Image (cartoon, grey):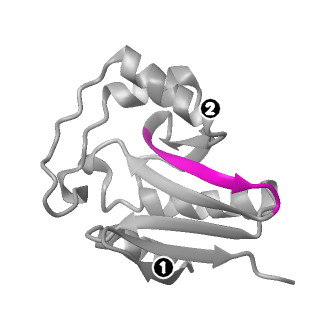
Amino acid sequence: MEQGKITLRPMTAEMYHCYLKEYENDPDLYLEGQAYAHYTYSKEAADRYIQRKIDKKQIPLAILRGDEIVGEIILKNIEAHTCATMGIALKNANYKDQGIGTEAERQAIRYVFDELDIPTLYADTIKTNTRSQHVLEKLGFVFLREDKDFRYYRIDRASD
């Protein structure tokens, strides 16, 4: 991570548009039998995506490397002072294998536990995404179960 410090910031609509203009679907993250679909930016589609985040009361956090938005962390299914679920997406495959996702998820965990005062954080990952599974386990998440398409994880704030 020599190319700049990783930080998280609340994602604004303007930031989302900048991020989504450079976003690329990751062909490694498609489920078996799914056809790869190239992502094409559209202001209208981006606005709908942003509105869904608002409607579902999700907390989107921009992953910044220096001043560049390189991904997003989504906190969803938030139950105040009880639990939430975390998801992550990097802008494109160029940002893999640099520790960016690991550091962003580490910061998001601290944010959920310390700032939001939520003691349990869940995460899920597509079954074929072994890279994400490795990161979650490295950060202390415990595997819970899997279904046809996903693996589910949980981490709890350490009690003092």
Q: From the viewer's perspective, tell me whether residue 78 is left or right of residue 62.
A: right
Quick check: 46 above or below 84? above
Q: What element carries label 1?
A: helix
Q: Quadrant of residue 77?
A: bottom right
Q: Are marks 2 and 1 in contact (CB under 8 Å)?
A: no
Q: Which residue is at the front of the view, 77 or 16?
A: 77
Q: Residue drawn at (50%, 33%), measured in percent from left and top? A: 67
Residue range corresponding to the magenta coloring: 70-81
Q: Which of marks 2 and 1 is nearer the N terminus?
A: 2
Q: From the viewer's perspective, tell me whether residue 47 is left or right of residue 134.
A: right
Measuring from the top left, give residue 143's x and y in whole percent: 49, 83
Q: Which residue is at the front of the view, 9 or 26?
A: 26
Residue receiving disc 2: 54
CA gap, disc 2 to disc 1? 31 Å
Q: Is 160 colored magenta in this rendering?
A: no
Amino acid type of disc 2?
Ile
Q: Residue drawn at (69%, 53%), measured in percent from left and top? A: 78
Q: Which residue is at the front of the view, 10 or 78?
A: 78
Residue situated furthest right in the rendering: 160
Q: Which residue is at the front of the view, 63 or 120?
A: 120
Measuring from the top left, give residue 6's x and y in whole percent: 52, 50
Label disc, if present, on residue 138 of the rendered structure: 1
Q: Residue drawn at (39%, 15%), measured in percent from left and top? A: 44
